[in-house]
Amino acid sequence: MKKKLLALVLAAGMVASMAACGNTNSNGSASADNSSKDTSATAESTDSDLAYVKDKGTLVVGITDFEPMDYQDENGDWIGFDADLASAFAESLGVDVEFVEIDWDNKILELDGKTIDCVWNGMTLTDEVTSSMSCTNAYCNNAQVVVVPSDVADKYQDKDSLKDLTFAVESGSAGEAQAQELGLNYTAVTAQSDALMEVAAATSDAAIIDSLMAAAMVGEGTGYSNLTYTIGLNDEEYGVGFRKGSDLTAELNNFFKSSYADGSMEQIAEKYGVQAAVVEQK
């Protein structure tokens, strides 16, 4: 009788143990599935710049003071061809836009550190830029030009005439690259606007800046009426830079196409006098 009772107790224990193991496995499996789903969702959010920007509700744009692309009006608001386009793009995403002045030399660090979401500031598509960022299609043509005082402009009409001049150039810019390529004597400054100030103050003989900026800021009717630009040193194109692998790049390329097709890009360009430089978006 004792043997039968013992056998029944052992059998009941085995059944209970099996049931418990079954419940543990079932719960563990469900928990693992949920964990997998959560991880996947988190990874998707982390990998998507578009989701990241929409989640925080703001597109942070890295810029410098660069008329006619990005500059402040009398109220301190950022305007310009790039600034207005960036505002329109942010609106299309359903988020606000915030403009942050950056040190141009540190643009890649700022971008990768997520203090900004893009660099949108008349940025030349150089090898350094395209290898370090995810860049849009070109949307604007440009060139680097030499700016000198108007009263000596006739002396500086070719590259050979530049060799004895001292130049001011924006640090990390396409202008600095041109100065290096030509072996010119130059001082690197924080912004292109500072380079113009150097020439106006006669602390530098000349500056190398973007042609679009030169057209807007030097010559008759501008704040630098005693300066003019002479020779063009190269041909280049502007693009917008995002973090490597960013899905915002394709989003902005699509925005460029639609805004070019409906004429809104040209309207903004005409407002700032850069319509001749706009690149057709296909």
Image: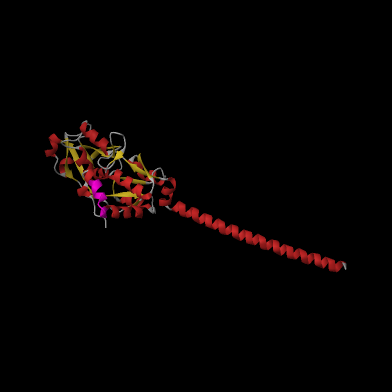
Snapshot quadrant of residue 169:
top left
Tell me if residue 97 is in the magenta stretch.
no
Residue 62, image x, y percentages: 35, 43
- Give the answer, above or below, for where 143 lies relative to 6: above
Tally of numbered discs:
0
Residue at 25% across, 43% down: 175
Considering every residue shown, the one lying at the far top of the view is 201
Residue at 24% across, 46% down: 269
Snapshot quadrant of residue 28:
bottom right
Q: What kind of secondary structure does the magenta stretch mostly adopt?
A: helix
Snapshot quadrant of residue 80:
top left
Magenta region? 260-269
Residue 234 visible in the displayed image: no
In the image, 254 versus 202, the foreground residue is 254
Considering every residue shown, the one lying at the far right of the view is 1
Residue 112 visible in the displayed image: yes
Tell me if residue 262 is in the magenta stretch.
yes
In the image, 1 versus 237, the foreground residue is 1
Residue 45, image x, y percentages: 46, 52
Residue 132, image x, y percentages: 36, 50
Residue at 72% across, 62% down: 17
Q: Quick one: quadrant of the N terminus? A: bottom right
Residue 217, image x, y percentages: 21, 38
Q: Quick one: quadrant of the C terminus? A: bottom left
In the image, 256 versus 242, the foreground residue is 256
Q: How was this image coloured?
A: secondary structure
Considering every residue shown, the one lying at the far left of the view is 154
